[in-house]
Amino acid sequence: MENMPKLGFGLMRLPEKDGKIDHEQVCAMVDRYMESGMNYFDTAYVYHGGRSEVAAREALVKRYPRESFMLATKLPAWELRKPEDIERVFNEQLERAGVDYFDFYLLHSIEDGSNYDTYVKYDCFDWGVKKKAEGKIRHFGFSFHGSPELLEKILDEHHEVEFVQIQLNYLDRTNPVVRSQKLYEILRDRNIPIIVMEPVRGGMLANMAPEIEAKFKARRPEKSIASWALRFVGSLPGVMTILSGMSDEAQMEDNIQTFRNFEPLSEDEFALVDEVTDEILGMPQIGCTACKYCCDGCPKKISIPDVFRTINTLRRYPNDWRSRNFYAGVTKRGGKASDCIGCGQCERVCPQHLPIIELMKEAAEILDT
């Protein structure tokens, strides 16, 4: 995995025109990216409704020598219903992308529960090893959205994993759902190369409140706000490649400028990022300590601490889809926030004296409507 570019071109948020991928603009972006000396492209079976791999074929594979670029894609657990589906999907991906092999191949979105269970059920780790032996995959790994405990379990059991792709940015270091700092530390302790996704948190760290942006501009007026997020993850040891889902040529150009003559964050700049992080995370939080005294007597079997954990995360990260996925999992095992009947049993036993009934109404409006 030598000669990996620091900036990877993520093909998940390609520009569209009239409801279709804008082929002309994608070609121009691919050309500019390749011209800059970078050559790692990341797609997946499900991106753009299955059209991203085809876009890679048209804009990249047909126009550049195969050895001049690296192409990554992913196996989706949710498409697997029987063992034969693995080969069906993989062969379809080869055809869509117009290649004979993938440089990097990932099990897509491993998380606690269904996705990981599916990959285990169909022996997908062993399958990946066989595909490497056949020369159809050069490097094998997975993208991860699960718990630190699950990550350690997988790495203990599957030494064939060569790299792991995680969500990592300065805001998610202490996110109680993502827990990216812990994931990063686990991978660093094991010396496993890291590919970073969501370094700008879906654009959230490119456009922030004016008073926060002013702090960055006062320090480096010539640099974009997004560049701070990219430089943060690019400054971390063990990070092999940072994916950016660039949607237009302006984003592409800004990112290329960030990485062309890459400057790691200085000690003072790290301190500024910490200051900004603290300010963003300074939103009011529900003071639940997850003692679970409220759970035992709940007539609707609502996991109240998990509901509050979700709300706390969404107060800081309003568009966090993983928090909503987490909540969906919680409600499969118990009641929803909107199931609360206001009996008050929980409030009587809460050591923090939280107004749980009112908070559950807020949660129901956010999560169940």
Image (tube, grey):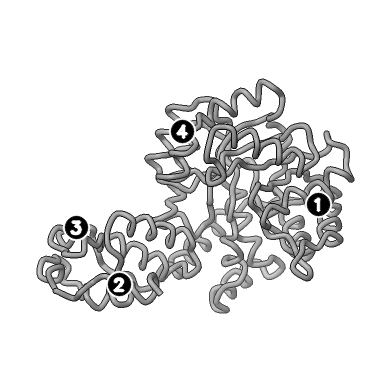
Write down the residue under mark 4: 120
Write down the residue under mark 1: 33
Write down the residue under mark 2: 338
Write down the residue under mark 3: 292
Residue at the spot 63% in from the left edge and 51% down from the top edge: 46
Task: Tell which circle, 2 or 3, labels the residue nearer the N-terminal end.
Answer: 3
Residue 336: x and y in percent read 30, 66
Residue 236: x and y in percent read 56, 46
Task: Tell which circle, 3 or 4, labels the residue nearer the N-terminal end.
Answer: 4
Q: Is residue 237 visible?
A: no
Task: Tell which circle, 1 or 2, labels the residue nearer the N-terminal end.
Answer: 1
Q: CA distance from mark 2 to mark 4?
A: 35 Å
Disc 2 secondary structure class: helix
Count residues near mark 3 (Cα–Cα under 10 Å), then give few for <14, some for 14-19, many for 20+. some
Q: Residue furthest top?
A: 133
Mark 2 residue type: Ser
The answer to which of 268 and 212 lies nearer the viewer is 212
Mark 4 residue type: Val
Query: The C terminus is located in which quarter?
Result: bottom left
Disc 3 secondary structure class: loop
Mark 3 residue type: Lys
Name the image quarter holding residue 244.
Answer: bottom right
Judged by depth in the image, the label closer to the viewer, 1 or 3, is 3
Q: Is 145 placed above or below 318 here?
A: above
Left/right of residue 270 with respect to residue 16 in the rendered view: left
Q: Is 304 placed above or below 153 here?
A: below
Mark 1 residue type: Tyr
Task: Tell which circle, 1 or 3, labels the residue nearer the N-terminal end.
Answer: 1
